[in-house]
Each structure stands twice: as C-alpha cells, then as structure tokens.
Image (cartoon, rainbow, N blue to C red):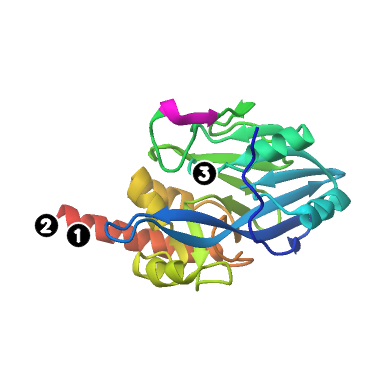
Amino acid sequence: MNYPQALPHGELTQVLANIYLVTGSVSMKVPHPKWGPFSQVFSRNMIVVKQGGELILINSVRLDEKGIAELDELGDVKHIIRLAAFHGFDDPFYKETFGATLWSVDAPYLKGFSLEKSSEYYRADRILKSGDALPIRNASYHEFATSSPKEGLILMQRDNGILISGDSMQNWSRPDEYFNWLAKWMMPRMGFISACNFGPGWLKMAKPDSSELMEKAMLNYDSLLPAHGSPIVENARKGFVLSAKRLQSRTKAIDNR
C-alpha cells in the first residue's frame, strides 16, 4: 500500500502524566473557478497515551524517521484510535508498520469529504459504539449519536477528567506555524479560530443536534486534548458549556424567524 508521506510536524511533547502530543499538518485542496485549486494547510494533533510499555495513538499523524524513533523510545505502538470520520489517512501506515489494532468511530474510511461508501479505502479492526471498552484503562467512549457521520470522544477518568476529541471540540485561539497564508486568511473568516469552539466544518457537514453538543460539553472533565488547536489543561468544561449555550441560542433564534 502506498502511504501518504509524512508532512511537517513538531516534537513529541508531554502534556500530562503519560500523555504526549505532537502537532503536525494537513493539506486540503480548495477549488477556485478562475485559478484552479489552492492548497490550504493547517495543523492537526496526535495524542499518544503511554500505558506501561505500550502506546495508544489517537488521531494519528504520520511522523518522519526522527519522530518514529522518538515513538520507539517511548514504547511499542499497540493500538490506534480514530475519533473523527474525516480523519484517518495515516492509520494504515501505523497499523501495518507496527501490527497495531485499529479502533474506529462508526464511520467508513472515505477519501476527502465524500459520503459515498463506494470510495471506502480501508477498514478498522474494531468499530466503536458508546459505552464500548477501550484499550485505555479507566477511559470511556462517547459518541455523537446525532452526528452524520458519527464522531467520537474519549473521557479518561483521572486528573479531574481528560477529554480527547476529533473534529467536534477544538481550541484554535490563533493560527499557528503550520497554517499557510491561505489558511491564515480563510479560517478566521470561517469561524475556526476561536477558543473552546465546536468545529464549524464539522457542524456544517455532520449537523449534530445542539442539545447533544450541550450533553457532551457537560461531561465530567477539566482538560481537553483536541485534534485541532492547543490543549486545555484546566477549566475546559466551562468554556465548552458556554460555547454550547451560544450555539443553542443561535439555533433558537433561527427557528423563531
């Protein structure tokens, strides 16, 4: 299988005890009727949970040779978990390179933002449902049931609660070093650059109920480790409850027109 190449990324950094984060990048084609497609490049995060000598990768990002060597020093990659339906193109590399078990949100691996199952290119070993056991100790899996396609969250019951998200819950307070000029210009205008933010692209594509946004915002957590944006190590819950309230108010205003 031809795997996507490793894109620019940073170093593996410890954010909490036995939890590491590395920020990488992704490139998306943006069509233009006159000048053709442009590449919009922005950041994405991989979370690495160390459990004894084993590693669990969440929201995988392919690393270069130096990054893989750092992973090898940290432990053995045993599991990969995909939380976001629109993520996952680096999962095959890790599964087949390390012989790891691949766990996925209940959504097929599709190319780009296609919702056509005929474009499915890969399959997971395990499909996750709310309440399923995870390969992470003292952790639970939570699903956005009203999202189409589905979207997942992991809640670790330690340090006052650690929530790990995919596209749903983001924290881009500003464009970072992995944004190219187009992303720096476009994404603030599209509502992506905001702290404690429900992903605008995900909201538009997946259309979850606002009541479920509040339900997930009210989970018992203090920290958020997102696929997009900076980690929040305290008071994350308060910020997302306020964000969910704003979205609920906006939905009611539209409904009352």
Q: Residues within 10 Å of mark 1 (few under 14, many from 20)?
A: few
Q: Secondary structure at mark 1?
A: helix
Q: Which mark is residue 84?
A: 3
- Residue ID for mark 2: 257
Q: Which residues fall within the magenta stretch?
A: 117-121
Q: Is residue 131 magenta?
A: no
Considering only order in the chain, which callout, 1 or 3, is on the residue closer to the N terminus? Answer: 3
Q: Is residue 33 left or right of residue 254?
A: right
- Residue ID for mark 1: 253
Q: Residues within 10 Å of mark 2 (few under 14, many from 20)?
A: few
How far, Cα to Cα, is label 1 from label 2?
7 Å
- Residue 95 against residue 17 in the figure, above or below: above
Residue type highlighted by circle 1: Ala
Residue type highlighted by circle 3: Ala
Q: Residues within 10 Å of mark 3 (few under 14, many from 20)?
A: many
Image coordinates for residue 59, horizontal then vertical, percent: 61, 47
Which residue is pictured at 47% across the width and 49% down the height? Answer: 216
**Magenta segment, principal secondary structure?**
helix
On the question of residue 181 being in view, the answer is yes
